Amino acid sequence: MIRLVGLLRRALGDPVSLSLRAWAAALPLVMIDAFSIDFLVLPNAQIDASMAQAAIAAMGYAIGGLWLVLARPLLRLVKQPWLLALAAWGAVGATWGGAVAWWSRSVSSDASVVESMGIGATLLATAAMSVVFACFIAIVLHAHRQAQVASVEALEAASRYRRASEHMSAVQMNARLGFRAWIDEVLQPTIDALRRDVDVRGPRAAPRVDEVREQVVRAASRRLHPRTVALGPHVALGSVLEAYGFADHLEVKLSGEMPTEVTACLARCLDVLLSKHRAGPVHVRLHQDLGHVRLHVTGVPDSVVAAGPEVLARVQNLDGTVEMADGGLDICMPLRGHERVEVDQAQVVRYQDIDVYVWVAGALALLTGIVLALLGGSVLSVVLGGLAVIVGAIVVRILPVWWIVDRTDPVRIGAGVVSVALAAGGISGLVTFVWAVTADDLSRAEGVIVFWLANAVVAAVVIVVVVLIRAQVRSWEARVDYAEQMSAAALLRARSAIGEVDRFREDVASSLHSHVQARLIVAASRLEDPRGGDVCCAQRALLAIQDEDISHLRGLVDGGVNPPHSLSALADAFADIDVLMDLDDGFAGQEGGAVVEVVHEAIVNAVRHGGASQVRVEVTSQEGDWLVTVADDGSGPAEPVHSGLGLSLVDAASRGRWALTGDDCVGALLSVRVRK
């Protein structure tokens, strides 16, 4: 009942409840009601008089439609629009009831329903019946409109996702071709030149090695390593800007956390835009606004936006928008979950869990109560009449009345017609019995039979209308479900295409960070060793990049296996550095995770800042955490410790549960707790 009341409020609050369609749909019900009321009230009703009364009611109803015209503009201005809709429909009913009363008093010389009931009761009855009809029709029209909106939105989303998938397929091909060109034209020649420079200059080539390492880091940052995204939008966007030389051109104003998916999307869009940018200053502003986050990029020309369909594909995939505004590009993203784009179920009216008998019982109970009350029945007769309708309407659930809409089998249609007749006759019989028992003076037998027949006709009309509505709503829901399935399938393809691009770029970034950068750090540290530069060690590290890492990167371009991301693979990445592993039995063999990231950053800092030649890594299990300790034989941590990007990543992975110490026996000791 609460669900039905909420449905009525939403339906009556929709402007469609006061539309021409609603008015036209209620007209046949008004004429049937005006025709049958004589047979319900008068013992000797005449068919011709009832037909004339139905025509007068239709004329009065047409005039009463002006109340709907006047109320419609006000519907969106009032706080409780459904109350306005009820009042407007009540006025319509009173108008056509007044027309019937006028005609009955001025034209008819015989006994009429108006004389029998009184003018006031007649107007009250017609107003109440109009409200019942309005509620019935408003729910149906509201369902139709919401189903149309839902299906259109789902189909538009499916089209948008298909475009995104097509764009990302092209982006994937361009990304692979572009990275292969970077390997062949930039990385390979740079490493070759660096090896020759080390041969000629020896330890004096250390600054050049470190310069190349910075270039590799910037190239990896452009591909947005997932570790950077995890630290939030400021670090993610800042790393992209820094890779292009705009480190100080970022302004971030957020009042809360931003989903990682949105952060990654905005950072990758910024990378695409800046990769096409050739000259001029660029400023990036990120701010939150009423459930949305906006990224505004100034200094990027329109030609850059046109050259980057990946931006549109990524943003639309998360239901965002892209437009040119205030001399730059404005990306607006909703701050909500993006596991799957859902149609708002609170707005799309679903009826499959509301049985037909509930609709029939509700409509007939209201109409029966109105009729019995106007016939002068007591409160007991009205209550018992309503209960009789509810009990009788349960029969509708037992009988296959919905077979009347089965167009494939004439036998089932016939059985459905018989079921409707039986259900209507049974409901009318119960109501007639209640009225006959509770009435003060019983009418003659002919009057009772006429009352039963008239009630049966009304009940049959209501049952048929409800069954037709049920079938129509099911077809609308099937259309919405089909559109949503198409949207979900297109979304899956788009996300798969985007995921392939992202995985490729993340694999590239991981290889550049974890392997190429690691070997360059070893080469630079060996050349800068205060005890004397070790040129041979530096050359071995550079040769490993040339022989192993570059070939592996080419394999990634060709769709090869992903780079290994485990502690054992990490130890092999640092050429000429003894990495000793002591791993818990429960951790040995695990791939990826925060522990690997923590160990990687610890070794990088030990070699780069401490000049370590040996690192000991221990991973043990302690109370739901992994306790990671990394000790080295380097020069130890500086005082005070400056937290750069590496330690920021360690801090994020451990939630602040880390400590960096040093003493005479150990160069540096990093202890970190990482949740399992």
Image (cartoon, grey):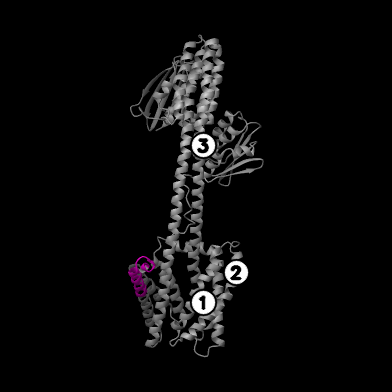
Q: Is residue 352 above or below residue 486?
A: below
What residue did someone put label 2 on? 69
Q: Front-most of 80 and 539? A: 539
Q: CA distance from mark 1 to mark 3?
A: 66 Å
Relative to 317, 430 lies left or right? left
Q: Earlier in the sequence, mark 1 or mark 2?
A: 2
What residue did someone put label 1 on? 126
Q: Front-most of 529 and 179? A: 179
Amino acid type at circle 3 is Val
For label 3, count other residues whose C-alpha is less than 10 Å away and answer few (under 14), some (14-19) or many (20+).
some
Disc number at residue 171? 3
User: Which of the 4 quarters of the picture holds residue 482?
Assistant: bottom left
Q: Front-most of 495 and 551? A: 551
Q: Is residue 37 above or below residue 403?
A: below
User: Range of the magenta residues?
Assistant: 402-423
Tell me what residue is drawn at x 59 percent, y 31 percent. 241
Q: CA distance from mark 2 to mark 3?
A: 54 Å
